[in-house]
Amino acid sequence: MMAGERTANRWIGLALLAFVAASLGALAIRLVWRNRSTIAAPAVSSSPAAPAAPIRVYYFHGAVRCASCNTIEAFTSETLCQRFASELAQGRIAFESLNYEAPENAHFKKDFDLTVNSVVLVSRGPDGATRWKNLIGVWDYLGDKPGFFEFLSTAIAEFQSAAARP
């Protein structure tokens, strides 16, 4: 083997090692942040034009949107339209897609511990306390539309059940 080939092989090996390390780091972050939820979070301001709903489903995205980000938004919208059509029609569930990098929405990043684009479920109880759940796990279902639908549907159903309990 010539010296030039060894150097090229070494660089390829280092590049692959860096890729594996970055992938493991991203996986660790997802596992840590998956299904984090908080009780009594800061109050969520809703736009005056939108009717108040017992559960608001937000898709938070940045200013620059990739194909994966658009897929998450589309899958979320489809899940709601197909599996929660009556709740949407009755105003018991509302969906909103927001750019959390826009100045008027920047507080959401802190309010809901947003580190990446995500779907967040929010409800406000009669006492004014806000409950929320960050569903960062949606990223795990990008290539699995039925899995995404099931993950989101189950999360919403569990969130509804918890909201109904005193």
Image (cartoon, rainbow, N blue to C red):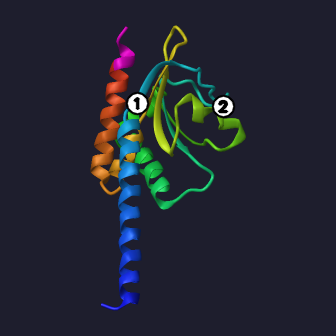
Please report the bounds of the magenta region as a residue range.
162-166
* Residue 79 visible, this angle: no
Q: What element carries label 2?
A: loop
Please give the residue where the numbered disc 1 appears in the rendered image. Answer: 36
> Vertically, is 75 above or below 88?
below
Please give the residue where the numbered disc 2 appears in the rendered image. Answer: 49
Q: Which badge, 1 or 2, is on the more N-terminal residue?
A: 1
| Residue 47 locus on image (x, y percent) | 65, 30
**Which corner quadrant of the image does residue 65 belong to?**
bottom right
Residue at 51% over, 25% down: 53
Q: How far apart are marks 1 and 2 (CA)?
A: 29 Å
Neighbourhood count class around disc 2 (C-alpha, 10 Å): few under 14, some 14–19, many 20 upward: few
Q: What element carries label 1?
A: loop
**Which corner quadrant of the image does residue 46 belong to?**
top right
| Of marks 1 and 2, the one in the foreground | 1
Compare residues 50 and 162 and report the one nearer the observer: 162
> Vertically, is 14 above or below 82?
below
Tell me if label 1 and label 2 are in contact, CB under 8 Å. no
| Residue 120 locus on image (x, y percent) | 47, 34
Dominant secondary-structure state across the stretch colored magenta: helix
Compare residues 109 and 123 and report the one nearer the observer: 109
Question: Three-letter amino acid code at disc 2?
Answer: Ala
Question: Three-letter amino acid code at disc 1?
Answer: Arg
